């Protein structure tokens, strides 16, 4: 897990994926973890709409957690 996370360039994306995985590891339900991560994204990006945050978080979870892909993702322009 740590090696995969080190490949995630965006700080907000890395924070979201780390939080999601850790919440799920301790038994948090999927939707509860998703909502927490959407909130976390919006803390990093208060300018983002709720719909934009939900879209990005779901894409990142699908990419990194579900598909276990290691390529770059679409998303915000931050570092």
Image (cartoon, rainbow, N blue to C red):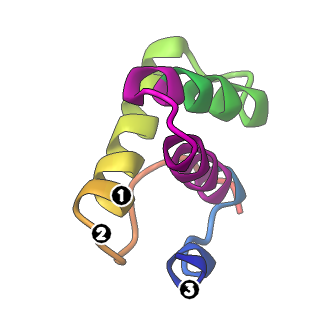
Secondary-structure class at tag 2: loop
Q: Which residue is rendered at x = 69% and y = 32% of the image? A: 40
User: In terms of sequence position, does the residue under pointer 3 or pointer 2 come before the other?
Assistant: 3
- The residue beneath circle 2 is 68
* Inter-mark Cα distance, 3 to 2: 12 Å
Task: Give the numbered dot on residue 65.
Answer: 1
Q: Nearer the viewer, residue 6 or 75?
A: 6
- Going by the image, does 34 lie left or right of 10? left
Q: Residues within 10 Å of mark 1 (few under 14, many from 20)?
A: some
Q: Are marks 1 and 3 in contact (CB under 8 Å)?
A: no
Q: Nearer the viewer, residue 56 or 38?
A: 38
Prevailing SS of the magenta stretch: helix
Q: Is residue 27 visible?
A: yes
Where residue 8 sits, quadrant-wise, is bottom right
Q: Nearer the viewer, residue 78 or 33?
A: 33
- The residue beneath circle 3 is 3
């Amino acid at each position: 897990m740590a090696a995969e996370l080190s490949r995630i360039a965006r700080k907000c994306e890395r924070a979201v994926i780390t939080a999601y995985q850790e919440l799920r590891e301790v038994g948090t339900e999927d939707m509860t973890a998703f909502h927490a991560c959407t909130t976390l994204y919006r803390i990093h990006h208060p300018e983002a709409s709720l719909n934009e945050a939900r879209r990005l978080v779901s894409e990142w979870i699908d990419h990194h957690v579900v598909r276990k892909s290691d390529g770059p993702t679409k998303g915000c322009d931050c570092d």
